[in-house]
Amino acid sequence: MTIAHIKVPNGKQYQLETGIFINNEFLATESQLAVEDPGTGTEICAVHLGDERHVEQAVKSARKCFTEVWRSKSGRERSDLLLKISQLMLEHSDQLADLEALESGKPKATNAIFDVLHSADVFRYYSALAMTAEDGKTVETERSKFTYTVTEPYGVCAAIMAWNFPCSTFAWKVAPCLAAGNAIVVKPSENTPLCALYMCELFLKAGAPAGLLNVVCGLGAKVGSAIASHPGIDKVTFTGSTVVGKTIQKLAAENLKACTLECGGKSPLVVYDDADLEQAVKWAAFGIFFNKGEICTASSRIYVQAGIYDEFLDRLKKHVEENFVQGPQFAEGVNVGPQVSKVQQDKILDYVKIGVAEGAKLVCGGNKVPDLAGYFLQPTILADCSQSMRVVQEEIFGPVVTVSKFNTDEEAIELSNDSSYGLAAYLFTQDINRSQKYIREVQSGQVFVNYTFAADYRMPFGGYKMSGIGRELGEAGLAAFSQTKAVHINLSSKL
Ligand code: NAD
């Protein structure tokens, strides 16, 4: 039996398949893992856990689908399926958002719905790109030769995923992978497997061929590493911490598997003295506290020019205290939910203590939220931070922001780049020359001027330095699942 009965605090009830999904069937396994509602700390349901044998089965099923069915589909046919998935996601957006809110701690009305609609757009976008995914190019070489390229899928790909955006991480990986013509094996995070399982139900509804999508829930050290080292998988795409990303790259080297790694971040936000201060304060707060700081591109290091430092800090504190309403995911008016787990809550609280011990000034927050049973943490500002502090250098992945002072434009760039990460950078200025210099010199995969945001599905997304390898989204996200074949034809046949 693989069906769970899920009760959502908003009164709704759902049945959800919780088995591993291979060859279009949900299968029961010997072991199960409880999935928790971080808003209450209680169990939502248990999902079936796979192991190395299930990875083997899933890879076989994906290979069969790739060779016998999916490889011969035209771009138009692949496009049709992806569009159908996008439409089904919209039709079932309320249920998907309920599940995402429940398992990840996102407030349903603000964050979870946003993530689901964005994910449906990602499928729609790659449905369009699927039509031309195998296009090549003729290349002028010699008169006696006809030379051109063709674009081809890898074959079987796999995705290993983090927990902070369960729906969109699935969409960012699965949609371009299938659009390019591959089949896929997915391993969701142990914390948030429910959205991926629900997506399997939508794939069945859409009439997807057996083996195109396989989902094997399981532990990272078992299922994740079996995927990363499997010789039958041609490409792996990973979203998670830098430390696990490095392990995956080492395991993948066994069969020279291509890797896309979307890893951690510690993104700087620079406020120059000519910025629109009111807007800079609002965006800075949004950049770190949206999704309770559980966002890889969070603007977690703020640098403010000396002349406006005190005023910025006062305004930021006031804004945070007046605008963020914490509470359970389904409560009205709430815009900040609980951290995803007790492990994360404890880790973040430890970092606050480390920061204060290192000499940072605790401006606000720093504690659990009184009277709330789940894993809630107050939005926290640590000021007067110096560059060598661990809270400035290490990814906290929670609602904690450091604020530091700088004097010159050169210093702002130097401080921004003084990090092992390079995922996103934000700057606030009215001066186009200042912004151009910063954009050129900052070592970061994304730069945002006068706003903070995570991504747009039409633009490439990815990290410099230890934030990752490769790009997702946009045309680059499709290219990441394709390889190029060069064809040389001798028209004269003479040596
Ligand atoms: P994590 O690295 O602990 O886990 C990510 C995934 O890897 C999980 O599915 C886990 O089971 C699996 N895993 C763990 N050990 C493994 C192993 N030895 N072999 C194979 N797989 C293994 O990360 P997390 O705690 O789930 O997520 C938080 C991290 O994700 C943060 O560092 C955050 O910055 C990062 N993240 C990055 C992006 C991005 O696009 N750059 C987006 C979201 C999250």
Image: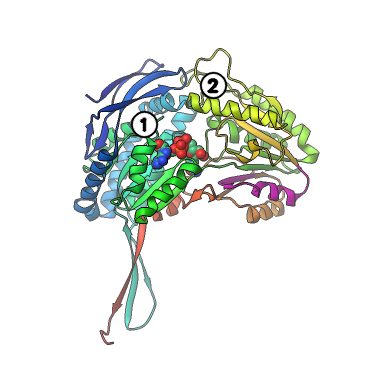
Displayed quadrant of residue 148: bottom left
**Would residue 169 be visible to someone looking at this image?**
no
- Whether 333 is drawn above or below 119: the answer is above
Q: x%, y% of residue 132? A: 34, 57
| Crowdedness near tag 2: few (<14), some (14–19) or many (≥20) residues, C-alpha within 10 Å | many
The extreme bottom residue here reads: 494
The residues bearing labels 2 and 1 have C-alpha atoms spaced at a distance of 21 Å
Indicate whether residue 199 is drawn in magenta: no
- Rendered residue at 69%/47% (across/down): 415
Q: Secondary structure at mark 1?
A: loop
The numbered disc on residue 376 is 2
Disc 1 marks which amino acid?
Answer: Pro
Q: Is residue 21 left or right of residue 285?
A: left
Displayed quadrant of residue 168: top left
Displayed quadrant of residue 162: top left
Indicate whether residue 408 is drawn in magenta: yes
Chain part drawn in magenta: 406-426
Q: x%, y% of residue 185? A: 31, 43
Please tell me which residue lies in front, 446 or 275. 446
Write down the residue under mark 1: 193
Q: x%, y% of residue 406? A: 75, 43
